[in-house]
Amino acid sequence: MNKRDLSSLSISELSRLFRARKLSPVELTKHLLHRIERLNPELNAYLTITADLALAQARQAESELCSTKKSRRDRGPLHGIPLSLKDNIYTAGVRTTAGGKFLSDFIPERDAAVVSKLKSAGAILLGKTNLHEFAYGVTTNNPHYGPARNPWDTKRVPGGSSGGAAAAVASGLCVAAIGTDTGGSVRIPASLCGIVGFKPTLHRVSVEGIVPLSLTLDCAGPLARSVEDAALVLDLMATPRKGEVSFATSLARKPKKKFTLGIPKEFFFDILAPEVRSSFDASLKLLRKRGFATKEISIPLLNHTESAGNNIAWPEATRYHQKMDWFPKYSADYGEDVRSRLEIGARVTASAYLEGLEQRDEFIAQFHSVLADSKIDALVVPTTPIAAPLIGEEATTIDGKDHSTRALLIRLNRPANLAGLPAVSLPCGLTSSGLPLGVQFIGPGHADSRLLLIASMFENSVRSIGFPYL
C-alpha cells in the first residue's frame, strides 16, 4: 500500500483493508497524524490535536478488529476510522474552545451525544477543528486562534463556520469530520473546499452537548469526500426512524421512478457570479442527461427567509451568551464581528422575533405544499453565489455591484435551515482560477435518504466525465 494514497481512501475502502489485515488502524492514524504535523501549521485546520488519545483508540480498534475470531469485535463501518470534530462539540477531557478567547482552557466533563455514538462505533478522534468564533460567521477568520485556510488556495477562506473541518477533510487530514450548520455552516465550507456537506432534517441528529448558536435552527452533520462517506457517518449520528433502512444502504437502491427536481423562480438566481451560473447550468445539463426531470416552480416566501432567519438567530444567540454570563461581561474578549451581532441580537424586539417564527411556519407550509402539488422530489440550486473569497475580503463585486461577502455566502443556505429541511452540497466544477464550486439539493422534511440518493447519482455522473478532484 502506497502511504501517499491512504489519505484519499474512502471509509469503505479503509474498512475492507482493515478486515483483510492489509492495513491497521494504528498505521492509518500515524499516517494522518504525520500529515497533520506537516500541513496544519499552514492550514490551521486543527485547534487541538489529540495524538495520544487517537493512538490509544487506534490500538484498541486494531486489537478488536485483528484479534482471533473468538475474541474479535467488529463495531461496524466506522471502527478504526479517524475523524475530526468541530471545536464547539463537547469532548470529555479534551478542551472545547468554541473558537472563543475566554474558553481557551475549557475542558468539558462529558461528551456530546454525537461523540458518545462515535466512540461506541469505534471511531478515532484526531482532534478538534477551527471554526468561526462561536460558530457565528461564515469565514473561519478567527481573531483568537488565527484563520483557517482553504487548501485550494491558502490566501482564501475555507468557509464557515465549520471551516477547519472542511479544510481538514479536503486536505486529507482526516477521513471525515463532524460540523454544525445553523445558516449553512456545513454546506458553505463544503462548497468552497470541494467536498460533500450534509445538513440533516432538524432533530434527526442530537445537538445535546454542542455549544448552541440558535436553539431553533442548529443542526449537526458530516463533511466528507463522497456522498457514501457522508451517509456512513450520518448513519452513526442520526436517530433511526421506524422502518427506515440505513442511509448508506439507501444509496444502493435503484429508484422506483424518475426524480423530478425543482428550480425556483425566486431568490436563488438573483445574485450569482457568472462562473457559478455557468457551472450550475452545466450541472443541470448533466442531471437531465442522467435522466432527471426538471421543472421551474414558484415559492414566493423564499424572499423572506433571510430576514426571518436573522430575526430568529440573532436574539437566540444573544440570549444564550447572556444566560452563560459571557455577554456583555466579556464583551472586550469577543471578535468585532461576533460582538456586533450579539449587540444586534439584544436589540431585536419580541414582536420581530415572533414574526420571524410565524414567517418560518408559513414558509415551511408553502415549501411542502408547492413540492407536493408540483410532484417535486427536491430543489436543485447553487450552494454559494461565489467561490472562496480572499481572507479579509469584506465585499465582493458581482455584475458591477458590491455585496457583503458574508451575506453572499450565507444567502442561499438560510432557507433550508429556516425550514429544518435536509440539504446537501457537493462539488460541481471549478472556476477558471481552479477554485471549487458547489451545487445544493434541498428536500422536504425527512427525505434525507432520497436526497442522499439524488446526490450520489449526480456525484457518479460528475465522476464519469472526469472532474479532477472527484
Image (tube, rainbow, N blue to C red):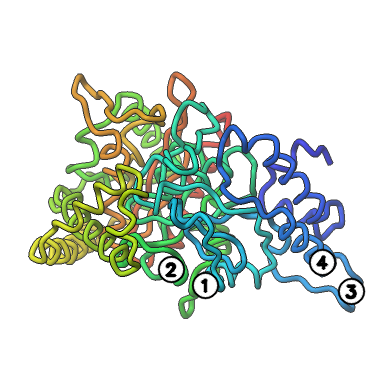
Q: Tag 2: Cα neighbours inside 10 Å, few (<14), some, or many (≥20)?
A: many
* Closer mark to the observer between disc 1 and disc 3: 1
State the residue at coordinates (61%, 37%). 171
Q: Amino acid at mark 3?
A: Lys
* Closer mark to the observer between disc 3 and disc 2: 2
Q: Pointers 2 and 1 in contact (CB under 8 A)?
A: yes
Instruction: Point out the tag, 1 or 3, that comes first from the N-terminus.
Output: 3
Give residue 95's quadrant in the image: bottom right
* Closer mark to the observer between disc 3 and disc 4: 4
State the residue at coordinates (51%, 47%). 130
Q: Amino acid at mark 2?
A: Val
Q: Is residue 64 left or right of residue 170?
A: right
Instruction: Point out the tag, 2 or 1, that comes first from the N-terminus.
Output: 1
Instruction: Point out the tag, 3 or 2, that comes first from the N-terminus.
Output: 3
Q: Secondary structure at mark 4?
A: helix
Q: Tag 3: Cα neighbours inside 10 Å, few (<14), some, or many (≥20)?
A: few
State the residue at coordinates (46%, 19%). 433
Outermost left residue = 351
Q: Is residue 441 left or right of residue 247?
A: left
User: Image quadrant for the C terminus?
Assistant: top right
The residue to which callout 4 is attached is 65
Outermost right residue = 68
Q: Pointers 4 and 1 in contact (CB under 8 A)?
A: no
The residue to which callout 1 is attached is 113
Q: Residue 207: which disc?
A: 2
Q: Residue 69: which disc?
A: 3
* Closer mark to the observer between disc 4 and disc 1: 1
Q: Pointers 3 and 2 in contact (CB under 8 A)?
A: no
Q: Is residue 223 left or right of residue 24?
A: left
Q: Secondary structure at mark 2?
A: loop
The answer to whether any part of residue 219 appears in the image is yes
Give coordinates of residue 264: x percent, y percent.
22, 45
